[in-house]
Amino acid sequence: MKSRKLSIPYLIWMVIFTMIPLVMIGVTAFTDKDGHFSFEPFINAFQYTNVFAKSLWIALLSTAICLVLAYPLAYIITKMKRSTQNTVIMLMMIPMWMNFLLRIYAWIILLQKNGPLDMALSLLGIHGTYIGNTAAVIVGMVYEYLPFMVLPIYTVMSKIDGGLIEAAQDLGSNSFYVFKKVIFPLSIPGIISGITMVFVPSASTFLVSQYLGGTDDIMIGDVIDKIFWTDQNTGAAISLVLMIFIFIFLVIMNLFGDEEAIA
Amino acid sequence: MEQNQAKVIVSLKDIFVRFDGEVILNHINLDIHEKEFVTILGPSGCGKTTTLRIIGGFIEPESGDVIFDGKKINSLPPNKRNVNTVFQKYSLFPHLNVYDNVAFGLKLKKLPKDEIKKKVTKMLATVDLKGYEKRSVAKLSGGQQQRVAIARALVCDPEIILLDEPLGALDLKLRKSMQLELKEIQRQSKKTFIYVTHDQEEALTMSDRVVVMNNGVIEQIGTPEDIYNEPVNAFVADFIGEANILNGTMIDDCRIKILGRELECVDKGFGKNTPVDVVIRPEDIIITPPEKGQLTGIVESTTFKGVHYEMSIRCGNCEILVQSTRCAEIGSEVGMCVVPFNIQIMNKLLPFYNNIIETEVTYSDEDGNMFEFELEGETVTVNGVYFKQGEKIRITLPPDALSLAGDGDGDLPDVYIESVVYKGEHNEIILESDERKWLMLSDVDEQVATYVHLNFDFSKADFEVIDSTEKTEG
């Protein structure tokens, strides 16, 4: 009973800041400009299908790259001395304290024409621009979200009981099999939460593509950002569709996770 | 006798291990024979688990050799050793079911699937877990997890099974039945079992041989009967079973003086008038009428233990534990007799009784009636006594002048408690500092293998100026 009373402030919070806005978005998405019930916003939203697909694709790609980079890194960190581990994790976090826009500007400077990358490659006789394309957007996103992949994987991995690793060695596993049979299967929950934590914000991100991408690298987050000022109904409809896609993705992820854990 | 002829399968030669500067194993030697059930017994922190981990390959000794089947295997990793371990916390793989846990080692050996299945099924039947194949290990009880861990090690068919306090987490009844079951499994499988425990009863129940360890050294190796009946020192006697351990003086061969009485015994070769430790098991004391006893005392308490009564009898300042099927009344005077054969004489753990410090006065103040000296890098202040600076002195501290500083602010910090033995009157505590050992009396049960701060009460000490021309001894 007591715990129920304690939860009341949170319930009120949830209702005001989660439930009501969700309902409002839902209502707005099914209303036309004159305030009547309508599917018009969804029909309008259809013209952004390409942007939508591209956004999900970029998010997926960034998530995959983050995973490929983060997993070995997390594994290497767990092998370090305890004090070194804390330092490395700290170093991973520090850039996150810097303003998001500043970090993106930094990438613009790094990638722009006559920037450090261009100059370095020019020495090898390669010339070109490295900004204003999809690759630059992905680089920016990977940079942005990598810590969100490393941290959950590292947390799960560092909690794996050392006794299990010894048991695996004792039963005849070399380091490769220890990894394959024990560390990897037990780190899957970390991978799943890492993927979730990277994919969800990347799918709806904006600004990164505006600053680092080309004209056709516009992402759905940017569309919502722009359109909402002129056409709230279509903006709400797009948001709703995006939410549904993310929801489906998460459900699939969780199914996948459960299966892996059993196998 | 049979064991001596059996082949030595694993042999530890002069093993020395140190972690962070702390000596864990101090040059131990141990031979283990084929098909033998050996138990390494000792209090926590004595180095028994480290010994096991050296055989398992998880620790490489700093010096010394591990010989397996005639070959030196010091740095061979665990996965290449024909040894399997049953871990203290079982360490079952939480992501695998019972079958896959047991099959883990066999799969790594790349055996054909049907053979793995045959072996695992047979092994699960052996440990009484038939039908549990598909269960998640997290849903098993402690005893069942234990059996999965044993099956997982046994199924690999190693030469040696190492067991690290495998029954520690089980309740008493289950532990007893698992002890017998383990012994039976060992007999049937004809494997060498090396078992680590701090439970002396477990060791006596299961083992062919018991290795008693303390403070990084092996105190005694022998059959359970040997260890119980002929302990080599007070530590072993105290650790194995109930014992009255008393201070005594060996008058001559076969003559021992304890509690002010001269008694006959069967031990020889300790010299004349040598201080010794004497062990008398409580069940070896016969209660007699007061006039017929070798010793007399007043019954202080009795406890009914089922098969016998346990009585505490006060004999002068000393408390003696007696087990007898007949109960004497509390407050009554009784006599006690021991046959000479049941009086076990042992050398003292320490060659001295009083703690002697020979040192030089580093600072003194005649008005303040005090002086200071250096002890293992610490400055110790003595009040109430004055010696000239630079004078060489000998301080004799009786064991009751030492005490532990509870507040962590003692004369000598970081002293290690090596052993605590109850001597009927007080606990005799042996402490080890950086450079030497100390003997202390205490009425409190201190925790062995911990670090404490030591305080000296110099009002109980004797001081003596050492003649500068005389050469200091000892």
Image: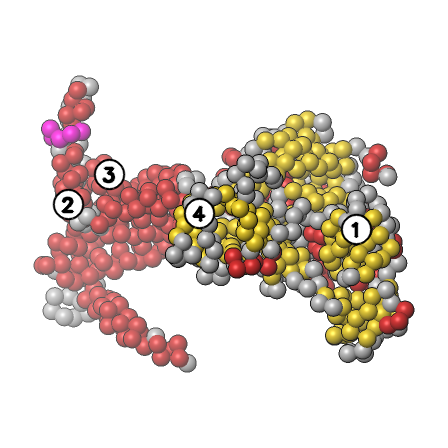
Is B126 displayed left or right of B417 in the figure?
right
First along the sequence among labels 1 and 4: 1
Alpha-carbon distance for marks 2 and 4? 74 Å
- Given residues A52 and B177, the one toward you in this image is B177
Evaluate whether label 1 is on the same chain as label 4: yes
Where is residue B354 drawn, in percent x and y? 62, 52
Q: Is residue B106 above or below residue B318?
A: above
Q: Dot 3 corresponds to which residue?
A: A139
Q: Dot 1 corresponds to which residue?
A: B250
Q: Dot 2 corresponds to which residue?
A: A102
Where is residue A116 drawn, in percent x and y? 15, 29
Badge 1 amino acid: Met
Q: Chain of mark 1?
A: B
Evaluate whether label 2 is on the same chain as label 1: no
Whether residue B160 is visible: yes
Residue range (magenta): A113-117
How many C-alpha atoms fall within 10 Å of the one at disc 4: few (<14), some, or many (≥20)? some
